[in-house]
Image: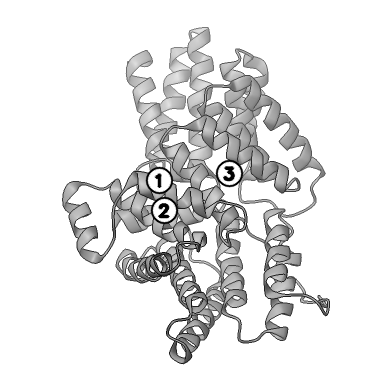
Amino acid sequence: MRAVRLACLLAAALALARPVGAQDAVALAPGETVVSLRWRAYDAAYNLDYDRAIDLLRAGTRRWPENASLYRSLATMAWLQILFARGSLTVDDYLGPLQKQYLAFRPPPPELTARFREYATRAVALAERQLARAPGDLDALYERGAAVGLQASYTGTIEGRMWPAFRQARRAYLDHAEVQRRDPRRKEAGLIVGTYQYVTATLSAPLRWMARFAGFTPSREQGVRNIREAAQRGSDAAIEAKFGLILILSRERRYLEALTLVNELRAAFPRNRLLTLEAGATNLRAQRPADAERDLEAGMAQLARDPRPRIAGEEALWRLKRGTARVALSRPEEARRDLSAVLAGDGRNWIKGRARVELARLDLATGDRASARRHLELARNLCVNDNDPMGAREAAELLRRTVG
């Protein structure tokens, strides 16, 4: 179950979404293909132009009503809309020990749930219909595995049901492992295969044995290798694989490698301000606060100019990161302004908890132990209540070491 949850979180770390209510008003060119259409749609989505992305995909289903990949892409958009509204899109959300993240959230809007299920079910059914006609069709096998893998991610991240997610994940893994076996050139199949190879390798010995019995092949090295190959140019899953690698490399504390990928994606999708946020956060993890502040300053200017919807608590997250960088740079007045704004505004409890940890550092630097204690005690509770064990542990440790 822990393996499934982490795999779902890896998928969630790729997530960016769009607001509800877009109008479907796209006319496709006569020479448009499914491949070119999906690339245009995902290019729009990765640039945060979600209305455009969904309109393109819906127009595609009118021209190619039997194409499973278009329905799978639309299901992905519905799932991502929910993640967008929750604000659980950054690597920070998924670096700690595996938690039942869904417990901190309200149920998703029924219309989005219905939309996801409709499109995902349609994608699976179309792929299976093609496999019934042509059992050797690797495109159809790949599409079935990809659609079922998406269902596993939704079941785990949105519904929090781990056993059903495990069964779906196993089916997706076996489909894509078969695609790899029959045609090693299909590098895109390595994303799902590599993800589950990696996550099952992180489990305890008894759970790894159970994973092997279920058909998985645990291996950190092979998992990362598969995902790297899926990230190659020309792979259907290249961009998703890069996002997955960013999360894995961050979990492995290989921050500079992760930063290289973040910057590659920033160059490819310049209208995606959240990639600039991730660059700043990754620089912080790499203990490069000056570089982090530079990225965050640029990103916050971009945010101020961007009229598009924001993720839940987005401004608070930007200010937390910039305030943290300024604490590390010994600029207490500027840092305190950012961190106090986090507490005064809207934001997730874990964001406010981590802001209080940084405020406690400022207090300790001036000798105000009583204020530091108050901040740290509140921080610990806020982080615990919002499924942030790393933040809670940091607050508790700082409280123990410096305040007593």
Q: CA distance from mark 1 to mark 3?
A: 14 Å
Check disc 1 and report its element: helix, strand or loop: loop
Q: CA distance from mark 2 to mark 3?
A: 16 Å
Q: Are marks 1 and 3 in contact (CB under 8 Å)?
A: no
In the rendered view of the protein, which quadrant contains the C terminus?
top left
Q: Are marks 2 and 1 in contact (CB under 8 Å)?
A: yes
Q: Residue 234 or 382: which is nearer the viewer?
A: 234
The residue lying furthest to the bottom in this view is: 133
**Crowd band around label 1 with a 10 angstrom C-alpha radius: few (<14), some (14–19), many (20+):** many
Position of 283 relative to 246 (above/below): above
Q: Which mark is residue 258?
A: none
Instruction: Give how far across and how far down residue 92 sits, in percent.
Output: 50, 40
User: What residue did someone put label 1 on?
Assistant: 387
Q: Amino acid at mark 3?
A: Gly
Check disc 2 and report its element: helix, strand or loop: helix
User: What residue did someone put label 2 on?
Assistant: 101
Q: Amino acid at mark 2?
A: Gln
Q: Is residue 144 left or right of residue 276?
A: left
